[in-house]
Amino acid sequence: MKENWRILCELWENYRRTLRLVWGASPRYAFFATFFAMLSAVAAPAQIWLSKVIIDSIISTIQRRVPDAAIEWTILFVPVGALILVLVLGEVGRRLAGSMVQILRFQVQHYVEYVLLEKAAQFDLAFFESATFYDQLAFARRESYRTFNLALLVTDSVGLLLS
């Protein structure tokens, strides 16, 4: 149990550092990517609820209908209009979130590269003559994309929790 707790704490710390790194790369795009992901995540439950409202309105209208009288369908205008609006907002949110994520990916990649090179510049020149150090630096540069993937996982998790 203690081991699981320690692993969970380490995982949380890694998430926190990754999010801080992504936020440092571009706070604006990180905010908008998260916002639009949450908007599209909220759209799915709203669509389900509005569909229920529409079905309930149809059933209620049919049950209250007087024989030989016309059915008043105008009460469906508001829920159907709201459903169409939610469908459009959900799709726009999904597409904008994808665009923001692509821009954020580019900015995070360059920011991580910048941070790595900035840290490497602090070392003495003798470190660069070491094959081990150079291999580690090259590995860190190659694997920098994983930072963004972890941040994207967290953003998607927020959207899943909302929906």
Image (cartoon, helix red, strand yellow):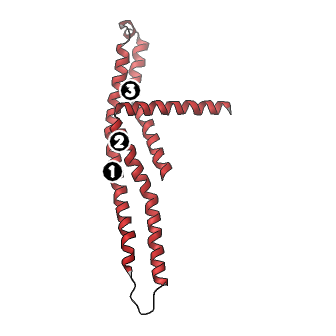
Q: Quadrant of residue 8?
A: top right
Q: Residue at x 40, y 35 (%)?
A: 148
Q: Residue at x 35, y 56 (%)?
A: 91
Choose the circle earlier in sequence order: 2 or 3. 2
Q: Which residue is mark 2?
A: 101
- Provide residue 30's location: percent of width, then percent of height: 37, 39
- Residue 111, placed above or below residue 46: above
Mark pair 1, 2: CA separation: 10 Å
**Label 1 is placed on what type of residue?**
Arg
Discs 1, 2 touching: Cβ within 8 Å: no
- Specify the quadrant that holds the N terminus: top right
Label 2 crowd bin: few (<14), some (14–19), many (20+), radius 10 Å: many
- Can residue 146 be seen in the rendering of this structure? no
Mark pair 3, 1: CA separation: 28 Å
**Label 2 is placed on what type of residue?**
Val
- Provide residue 140's location: percent of width, then percent of height: 41, 23
Q: Which mark is residue 142?
A: 3
Q: Quadrant of residue 3?
A: top right
- Which element carries disc 2, helix, strand or loop? helix
**Label 3 is placed on what type of residue?**
Arg
Q: Which residue is mark 1?
A: 95
